Amino acid sequence: MSTPLVLGIETSCDETGVGLVSEGRLLGDALASSMDEHARFGGVVPEVAARAHLEAMAPMVRTALRRAEVDLADVTAVAVTAGPGLSPALQVGLAAGKAYALAAGVPLYAVHHLAGHAAVDVLDHGPLPPRCVALIVSGGHTSLLSVGDLARDEVVHLGDTVDDAAGEAFDKVARLIGLPYPGGPAIDRAAREGDPHAIAFPRPLTGPSDPPWTFSFSGLKTAVARWVERQDGPLPVPDIAASFQEAVADTLARKAVAACADQGADTLLMVGGVAANSRVRGLVEERCAAAGITLRVPPIRLCTDNGAMVAALGDLLVRADVEPDPLDVAADPRARLTGALLHGTRPVAVG
């Protein structure tokens, strides 16, 4: 092929994602989930996830190549999630990425999982503005970031969660009220029949003296647990689900819109699995419209972990001529986001 073609591999948790992106276009992707295998445990088991990645990797690569109507020989670079995430799962994906890069004789980019979530929006809405605020909200992460050129610029952390991420709180509250894992979709469904104002759950860290960009959902989860403990009869599950979901959505929307105002940004990028929640999307959209802020959210199927987001980020790095990683690059399950690459920004390649 005369144009760059990036193979992206994502295995940070329980999805084995593979994508192929060329110059901002998604040509093909494939996704296998081991979620059903974890459901009986009420959460993801790292060793189970790693085994599932081993079994799914080659089939997903073949499927993505077939859907894109290309061969492995057409690939010009490989991008793979190297952190953060579950260590056994990351190791499988990184090993596969190195193997495919070595076999194809192409460069390797070890990228940051959260930067991939931000990059995937480019596939649907085009290049990001010179500066925007990103709200990353998922099972393991809830962060507000100041984002510029993903391939070249550092990402500035405005604030993160100090305990439970929003998605983790959804899972825990679902378990409290007898809903299945994963909790996010289950609560979203139940909330459709409930009253979001039935129960006055707190909006954590939204007071005037609280840190403005910091999140905390552990206390909200505890408030739900205490309310449930006080009930004698059958639980009003739809009302609990709707009221809890409203508290999460309201907290996220308040902080995200306020961060845009503080940073002078007229665009909010919302990404991550919780961005698929109907009330979170709806309320953030409503608040952004009222504040004159452009809201960008990827298509729902690309909000959760997938290979397209990693390939999209790799495509940006390739087109920016960023120096690739050596094949001995290591995974970092606790990597902090400072840029697209796991180990921070690097200058463009020379020559």
Image (tube, rainbow, N blue to C red):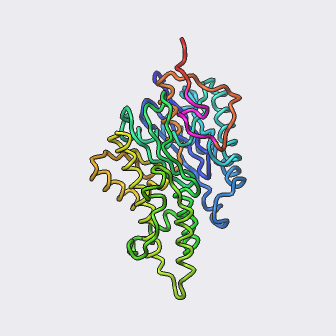
x and y percent of residue 76 in the render?
54, 26
Left or right for 314, reference 126? right
x and y percent of residue 50 in the render?
69, 49
Between 223 and 301, the one nearer to me in the picture: 223
Left or right for 163, reference 264? right
Between 188 and 39, the one nearer to me in the picture: 188
x and y percent of residue 78 in the render?
58, 31
Does the magenta-highlighted stretch encompass residue 76?
no
Residue that appears at 44% across and 68% down: 189
Residue 45's quadrant in the figure? bottom right
Between 34 and 237, the one nearer to me in the picture: 237
x and y percent of residue 351 in the render?
54, 11
The answer, for residue 351, to whether it is visible in the render is: yes
The answer, for residue 178, to whether it is visible in the render is: no
Residue that appears at 72% across and 53% down: 47
Residues shaded magenta = 335-345
Figure disc tally = 0
Instruction: Tell me if residue 214 comes above or below residue 237 in the rendering.
Output: above
Question: Farthest residue toward the front?
Answer: 209
Between 319 and 27, the one nearer to me in the picture: 319
